[in-house]
Image: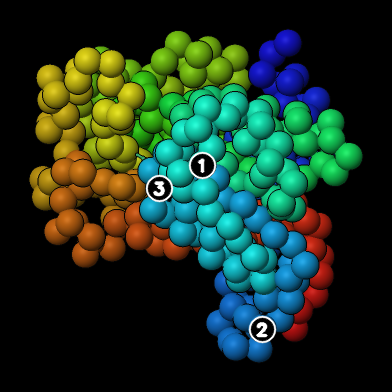
Amino acid sequence: MSENERLSNINPNELLHVISALQFKHEDLLILFELADKIRNIAETKAGLDFLRTILSHKRAVLYFAQPSTRTYLSFNNACQILGMQTSDMRIAGNSSEAKGESLEDTLETIHSYTDLLIIRHIEENLAEKAAWMYNNSDRPIPVINAGSGPNEHPTQALLDAYTLYRAFKGNIKNKTIAVIGDLKRGRTVRSLIRILNNFEYIKFIFISPIVLKIPEDVKSYLLKNNIVFEESDSLDSCIKTADVFYYTRIQDEYDMLNESKAIDYTNLYLNPEYLSKMQKNAIILHPLPRRAEIPPDIDKDKRAWYWKQEINGLWIRTALISYIFKVDGYILKYK
Ligand code: NCD
Protein backbone atom coordinates (compact mmCIF):
# COMPACT_ATOMS: atom_id res chain seq x y z
CA MET A 1 0.00 0.00 0.00
CA SER A 2 1.41 3.42 -0.92
CA GLU A 3 1.84 6.16 1.68
CA ASN A 4 -1.02 8.07 0.03
CA GLU A 5 -3.37 5.12 0.30
CA ARG A 6 -2.44 4.43 3.90
CA LEU A 7 -3.07 8.04 4.83
CA SER A 8 -6.37 8.22 3.02
CA ASN A 9 -7.39 5.11 4.95
CA ILE A 10 -6.65 6.90 8.17
CA ASN A 11 -8.49 9.95 7.08
CA PRO A 12 -11.09 9.30 4.42
CA ASN A 13 -13.30 12.38 4.46
CA GLU A 14 -12.15 14.74 7.09
CA LEU A 15 -9.11 16.04 8.86
CA LEU A 16 -8.99 14.20 12.19
CA HIS A 17 -5.36 13.17 12.41
CA VAL A 18 -2.61 15.28 10.86
CA ILE A 19 0.20 12.89 9.99
CA SER A 20 1.52 14.11 6.64
CA ALA A 21 1.43 17.25 4.53
CA LEU A 22 -0.02 15.03 1.78
CA GLN A 23 -3.34 15.18 3.61
CA PHE A 24 -3.96 18.89 3.11
CA LYS A 25 -6.21 19.72 0.19
CA HIS A 26 -6.40 23.14 -1.40
CA GLU A 27 -9.80 23.84 0.16
CA ASP A 28 -8.58 22.83 3.65
CA LEU A 29 -5.72 25.27 3.29
CA LEU A 30 -7.90 28.19 2.28
CA ILE A 31 -10.25 27.51 5.21
CA LEU A 32 -7.31 27.28 7.62
CA PHE A 33 -5.67 30.49 6.35
CA GLU A 34 -8.90 32.44 6.68
CA LEU A 35 -9.55 30.95 10.11
CA ALA A 36 -6.03 31.81 11.31
CA ASP A 37 -6.48 35.42 10.13
CA LYS A 38 -9.82 35.58 11.93
CA ILE A 39 -8.44 34.11 15.19
CA ARG A 40 -5.48 36.48 15.33
CA ASN A 41 -7.91 39.32 14.80
CA ILE A 42 -10.26 38.12 17.57
CA ALA A 43 -7.26 37.69 19.88
CA GLU A 44 -6.47 41.41 19.72
CA THR A 45 -8.97 42.24 22.45
CA LYS A 46 -9.54 40.85 25.94
CA ALA A 47 -13.17 40.13 25.09
CA GLY A 48 -11.97 38.20 22.06
CA LEU A 49 -9.41 36.20 24.04
CA ASP A 50 -12.05 35.45 26.70
CA PHE A 51 -14.34 34.16 23.95
CA LEU A 52 -11.62 31.95 22.45
CA ARG A 53 -10.81 30.49 25.87
CA THR A 54 -14.32 29.05 26.16
CA ILE A 55 -14.19 27.20 22.86
CA LEU A 56 -12.36 24.02 23.91
CA SER A 57 -12.29 24.44 27.69
CA HIS A 58 -13.77 20.93 27.99
CA LYS A 59 -10.80 19.31 26.18
CA ARG A 60 -7.30 18.23 27.20
CA ALA A 61 -4.12 17.82 25.16
CA VAL A 62 -0.89 15.89 25.72
CA LEU A 63 2.26 17.30 24.14
CA TYR A 64 4.64 14.37 23.80
CA PHE A 65 7.93 15.80 22.52
CA ALA A 66 10.74 13.25 22.52
CA GLN A 67 13.01 15.38 20.28
CA PRO A 68 14.15 18.93 21.09
CA SER A 69 11.75 21.76 20.31
CA THR A 70 11.27 25.42 21.14
CA ARG A 71 8.86 26.97 18.62
CA THR A 72 6.72 23.97 17.75
CA TYR A 73 6.25 23.07 21.41
CA LEU A 74 5.58 26.64 22.57
CA SER A 75 3.23 27.49 19.71
CA PHE A 76 1.21 24.29 20.12
CA ASN A 77 1.05 24.71 23.89
CA ASN A 78 -0.09 28.30 23.52
CA ALA A 79 -2.52 27.43 20.72
CA CYS A 80 -4.18 24.88 23.04
CA GLN A 81 -4.31 27.40 25.86
CA ILE A 82 -5.75 30.16 23.65
CA LEU A 83 -8.65 27.77 23.00
CA GLY A 84 -8.97 27.04 26.74
CA MET A 85 -7.54 23.50 26.67
CA GLN A 86 -5.62 22.02 29.59
CA THR A 87 -2.24 20.73 28.49
CA SER A 88 0.16 18.09 29.87
CA ASP A 89 3.78 17.78 28.82
CA MET A 90 5.94 14.75 28.14
CA ARG A 91 9.01 16.51 26.91
CA ILE A 92 11.97 14.14 27.17
CA ALA A 93 12.06 10.48 26.28
CA GLY A 94 14.05 9.80 29.44
CA ASN A 95 11.32 11.28 31.66
CA SER A 96 8.57 8.92 30.65
CA SER A 97 8.34 5.19 31.27
CA GLU A 98 10.19 4.46 28.02
CA ALA A 99 13.24 4.81 30.26
CA LYS A 100 11.85 1.97 32.40
CA GLY A 101 11.51 -0.28 29.37
CA GLU A 102 7.88 0.43 28.53
CA SER A 103 7.04 -0.16 24.88
CA LEU A 104 6.04 2.82 22.76
CA GLU A 105 2.66 1.16 22.15
CA ASP A 106 1.98 1.03 25.89
CA THR A 107 3.04 4.66 26.24
CA LEU A 108 0.58 5.61 23.47
CA GLU A 109 -2.14 3.56 25.14
CA THR A 110 -1.53 5.36 28.43
CA ILE A 111 -1.62 8.79 26.80
CA HIS A 112 -4.96 7.81 25.25
CA SER A 113 -6.39 7.21 28.72
CA TYR A 114 -5.77 10.78 29.78
CA THR A 115 -6.36 13.10 26.86
CA ASP A 116 -8.54 14.28 23.98
CA LEU A 117 -5.67 15.24 21.64
CA LEU A 118 -2.11 13.97 21.19
CA ILE A 119 0.53 16.27 19.69
CA ILE A 120 3.63 14.18 19.10
CA ARG A 121 7.25 14.73 18.04
CA HIS A 122 9.41 11.63 17.93
CA ILE A 123 12.48 10.41 16.09
CA GLU A 124 10.59 7.26 15.07
CA GLU A 125 9.11 8.09 11.68
CA ASN A 126 5.90 6.09 11.95
CA LEU A 127 4.95 6.66 15.57
CA ALA A 128 2.36 9.40 14.95
CA GLU A 129 0.76 7.23 12.29
CA LYS A 130 0.82 4.23 14.61
CA ALA A 131 -0.90 6.28 17.34
CA ALA A 132 -3.58 7.34 14.84
CA TRP A 133 -4.22 3.69 13.93
CA MET A 134 -4.38 2.62 17.56
CA TYR A 135 -6.74 5.42 18.51
CA ASN A 136 -8.97 4.81 15.47
CA ASN A 137 -9.35 1.23 16.61
CA SER A 138 -10.20 2.17 20.19
CA ASP A 139 -13.60 2.92 21.68
CA ARG A 140 -12.68 6.64 21.72
CA PRO A 141 -10.84 7.85 18.60
CA ILE A 142 -8.91 10.99 19.50
CA PRO A 143 -6.93 13.13 17.06
CA VAL A 144 -3.17 12.89 16.65
CA ILE A 145 -1.04 15.72 15.27
CA ASN A 146 2.47 14.98 14.00
CA ALA A 147 4.76 17.74 15.27
CA GLY A 148 7.84 16.25 13.55
CA SER A 149 8.55 12.60 12.74
CA GLY A 150 12.31 11.99 12.57
CA PRO A 151 13.78 13.21 9.26
CA ASN A 152 10.54 12.36 7.46
CA GLU A 153 7.77 14.95 7.90
CA HIS A 154 6.71 18.08 9.72
CA PRO A 155 3.24 18.81 8.32
CA THR A 156 2.33 21.71 10.60
CA GLN A 157 5.60 23.49 9.78
CA ALA A 158 4.57 23.20 6.12
CA LEU A 159 1.20 24.62 7.07
CA LEU A 160 2.75 27.67 8.70
CA ASP A 161 5.19 28.05 5.80
CA ALA A 162 2.31 28.04 3.30
CA TYR A 163 0.32 30.43 5.52
CA THR A 164 3.33 32.76 5.55
CA LEU A 165 3.47 32.72 1.74
CA TYR A 166 -0.26 33.44 1.68
CA ARG A 167 0.24 36.51 3.87
CA ALA A 168 3.42 37.69 2.19
CA PHE A 169 1.97 37.42 -1.33
CA LYS A 170 -1.52 38.69 -0.43
CA GLY A 171 -3.29 35.41 -0.99
CA ASN A 172 -1.55 34.61 -4.26
CA ILE A 173 0.78 31.63 -3.80
CA LYS A 174 0.80 30.33 -7.37
CA ASN A 175 3.49 31.05 -9.94
CA LYS A 176 6.37 31.44 -7.51
CA THR A 177 9.99 30.37 -7.73
CA ILE A 178 11.15 28.96 -4.42
CA ALA A 179 14.82 28.46 -3.68
CA VAL A 180 15.28 25.89 -0.91
CA ILE A 181 18.75 25.96 0.59
CA GLY A 182 20.69 23.77 3.03
CA ASP A 183 20.24 20.21 4.26
CA LEU A 184 17.71 18.95 1.73
CA LYS A 185 18.55 15.35 2.46
CA ARG A 186 17.52 15.20 6.10
CA GLY A 187 15.40 18.33 6.61
CA ARG A 188 11.84 17.13 7.26
CA THR A 189 10.42 20.61 6.74
CA VAL A 190 11.57 20.51 3.11
CA ARG A 191 9.77 17.26 2.29
CA SER A 192 6.56 18.56 3.89
CA LEU A 193 6.87 21.97 2.20
CA ILE A 194 7.09 20.38 -1.26
CA ARG A 195 4.06 18.25 -0.53
CA ILE A 196 1.90 21.12 0.70
CA LEU A 197 2.85 23.44 -2.16
CA ASN A 198 1.69 20.82 -4.65
CA ASN A 199 -1.73 22.39 -3.96
CA PHE A 200 -0.72 25.54 -5.84
CA GLU A 201 -0.12 25.98 -9.57
CA TYR A 202 3.12 26.83 -11.34
CA ILE A 203 5.42 26.55 -8.36
CA LYS A 204 9.03 26.08 -9.36
CA PHE A 205 11.64 24.82 -6.91
CA ILE A 206 15.38 25.40 -7.05
CA PHE A 207 17.14 23.09 -4.62
CA ILE A 208 20.52 24.39 -3.55
CA SER A 209 22.76 22.38 -1.28
CA PRO A 210 26.21 20.93 -0.82
CA ILE A 211 26.40 17.84 -3.05
CA VAL A 212 26.17 15.38 -0.13
CA LEU A 213 22.94 16.97 1.14
CA LYS A 214 20.91 16.89 -2.08
CA ILE A 215 17.17 16.08 -2.07
CA PRO A 216 16.57 12.35 -1.66
CA GLU A 217 15.31 10.11 -4.48
CA ASP A 218 11.81 9.66 -3.00
CA VAL A 219 11.32 13.44 -3.03
CA LYS A 220 12.54 13.60 -6.63
CA SER A 221 10.11 10.91 -7.71
CA TYR A 222 7.29 12.79 -5.99
CA LEU A 223 8.23 15.97 -7.85
CA LEU A 224 8.40 14.16 -11.19
CA LYS A 225 5.17 12.27 -10.64
CA ASN A 226 3.34 15.48 -9.83
CA ASN A 227 4.91 17.45 -12.70
CA ILE A 228 6.47 19.96 -10.35
CA VAL A 229 9.24 21.89 -12.06
CA PHE A 230 12.58 21.83 -10.23
CA GLU A 231 16.30 22.34 -10.67
CA GLU A 232 19.22 21.34 -8.49
CA SER A 233 22.34 23.38 -7.92
CA ASP A 234 25.20 23.89 -5.50
CA SER A 235 25.28 27.66 -5.88
CA LEU A 236 22.88 30.59 -5.54
CA ASP A 237 24.09 32.32 -8.71
CA SER A 238 21.40 31.04 -11.05
CA CYS A 239 18.47 32.17 -8.90
CA ILE A 240 19.60 34.97 -6.63
CA LYS A 241 18.11 37.66 -8.90
CA THR A 242 14.92 35.82 -9.81
CA ALA A 243 13.60 33.70 -6.93
CA ASP A 244 10.56 34.94 -4.99
CA VAL A 245 11.33 32.94 -1.86
CA PHE A 246 14.60 31.86 -0.22
CA TYR A 247 13.81 29.06 2.23
CA TYR A 248 16.89 28.36 4.34
CA THR A 249 17.50 25.34 6.56
CA ARG A 250 20.27 24.36 8.95
CA ILE A 251 22.43 21.25 8.69
CA GLN A 252 20.55 18.47 10.51
CA ASP A 253 23.61 17.00 12.21
CA GLU A 254 21.56 15.18 14.85
CA TYR A 255 21.03 12.52 12.16
CA ASP A 256 24.79 12.07 11.50
CA MET A 257 26.08 8.51 11.71
CA LEU A 258 29.76 9.37 12.09
CA ASN A 259 29.93 13.12 12.61
CA GLU A 260 29.99 13.53 8.82
CA SER A 261 28.49 17.05 8.90
CA LYS A 262 31.78 18.38 10.29
CA ALA A 263 33.35 17.87 6.87
CA ILE A 264 30.59 19.74 4.98
CA ASP A 265 31.30 23.30 3.90
CA TYR A 266 28.03 25.20 3.54
CA THR A 267 29.52 28.69 3.93
CA ASN A 268 29.31 29.64 0.22
CA LEU A 269 25.51 29.53 0.55
CA TYR A 270 25.27 31.61 3.73
CA LEU A 271 23.24 34.74 3.23
CA ASN A 272 25.47 37.83 3.02
CA PRO A 273 25.14 41.51 2.00
CA GLU A 274 26.22 40.71 -1.56
CA TYR A 275 23.45 38.16 -2.05
CA LEU A 276 20.96 40.52 -0.40
CA SER A 277 21.89 43.31 -2.80
CA LYS A 278 21.05 41.06 -5.76
CA MET A 279 17.70 39.74 -4.51
CA GLN A 280 14.40 41.10 -5.79
CA LYS A 281 12.86 43.91 -3.72
CA ASN A 282 9.80 41.81 -2.97
CA ALA A 283 11.53 38.49 -2.36
CA ILE A 284 11.09 36.95 1.09
CA ILE A 285 13.54 35.01 3.23
CA LEU A 286 12.14 32.14 5.30
CA HIS A 287 13.68 29.69 7.77
CA PRO A 288 11.86 27.14 9.95
CA LEU A 289 14.42 27.95 12.69
CA PRO A 290 16.53 27.30 14.67
CA ARG A 291 19.18 28.94 12.53
CA ARG A 292 22.89 28.64 12.79
CA ALA A 293 25.31 30.79 10.79
CA GLU A 294 23.41 30.47 7.47
CA ILE A 295 21.49 33.68 8.19
CA PRO A 296 23.50 36.18 10.25
CA PRO A 297 21.35 38.14 12.77
CA ASP A 298 22.26 41.42 10.99
CA ILE A 299 19.94 40.38 8.20
CA ASP A 300 16.92 40.36 10.55
CA LYS A 301 16.53 44.12 9.95
CA ASP A 302 16.06 43.68 6.20
CA LYS A 303 12.39 43.93 5.31
CA ARG A 304 12.64 40.77 3.23
CA ALA A 305 13.53 38.75 6.34
CA TRP A 306 10.22 37.05 7.15
CA TYR A 307 11.36 34.27 9.50
CA TRP A 308 10.27 35.92 12.74
CA LYS A 309 6.86 36.65 11.25
CA GLN A 310 6.82 33.05 10.01
CA GLU A 311 7.37 31.89 13.58
CA ILE A 312 4.43 33.96 14.87
CA ASN A 313 2.25 32.64 12.05
CA GLY A 314 2.87 29.19 13.54
CA LEU A 315 0.88 30.11 16.64
CA TRP A 316 -2.19 31.27 14.71
CA ILE A 317 -2.27 28.54 12.10
CA ARG A 318 -1.87 25.85 14.80
CA THR A 319 -4.73 27.44 16.77
CA ALA A 320 -6.77 27.35 13.55
CA LEU A 321 -5.81 23.72 12.91
CA ILE A 322 -6.89 22.56 16.37
CA SER A 323 -10.21 24.42 15.99
CA TYR A 324 -10.71 22.83 12.58
CA ILE A 325 -10.00 19.33 13.86
CA PHE A 326 -12.50 19.79 16.69
CA LYS A 327 -15.00 21.30 14.21
CA VAL A 328 -15.46 24.58 16.06
CA ASP A 329 -14.22 26.66 13.12
CA GLY A 330 -17.73 27.70 12.02
CA TYR A 331 -18.46 28.97 15.53
CA ILE A 332 -15.26 31.05 15.57
CA LEU A 333 -15.92 32.53 12.13
CA LYS A 334 -19.30 33.83 13.35
CA TYR A 335 -17.69 35.92 16.13
CA LYS A 336 -18.30 39.67 15.62
C1 NCD B 1 12.47 22.35 12.42
C2 NCD B 1 12.36 20.89 12.80
O1 NCD B 1 12.22 20.57 13.98
O2 NCD B 1 12.37 20.10 11.88
N1 NCD B 1 12.25 23.21 13.51
C3 NCD B 1 10.97 23.59 13.80
O3 NCD B 1 10.12 22.79 14.13
N2 NCD B 1 10.70 24.89 13.66
C4 NCD B 1 13.73 22.66 11.69
C5 NCD B 1 15.03 22.30 12.31
O4 NCD B 1 15.10 21.80 13.43
O5 NCD B 1 16.02 22.56 11.65
- Label 3 and label 1: CA atoms lie apart by 17 Å
Query: What residue type is disc 3 on?
Result: Ser
Which SS class for mark 1?
Answer: loop
Q: Residues within 10 Å of mark 3 (few under 14, many from 20)?
A: some
Whether residue 198 is visible to the viewer of this picture, yes or no, is no
Query: What residue type is disc 2 on?
Result: Asp
Q: Is mark 3 within 8 Å of ligand 1?
A: yes
Quarter-of-image position of residue 185 = top left
- Find residue 64 and report its horizontal and vertical position in percent: 55, 45
Q: What residue is rendered at 49% in x and 18% in y? A: 219
Q: Is residue 179 left or right of residue 55?
A: left
Q: Earlier in the sequence, mark 2 or mark 1?
A: 2
Q: Which mark is residue 69?
A: 3
Q: Is residue 140 left or right of residue 275?
A: right
Q: What residue is rendered at 21% in x and 44% in y? A: 292
Which SS class for mark 2?
Answer: helix
Circle 1 residue: 96
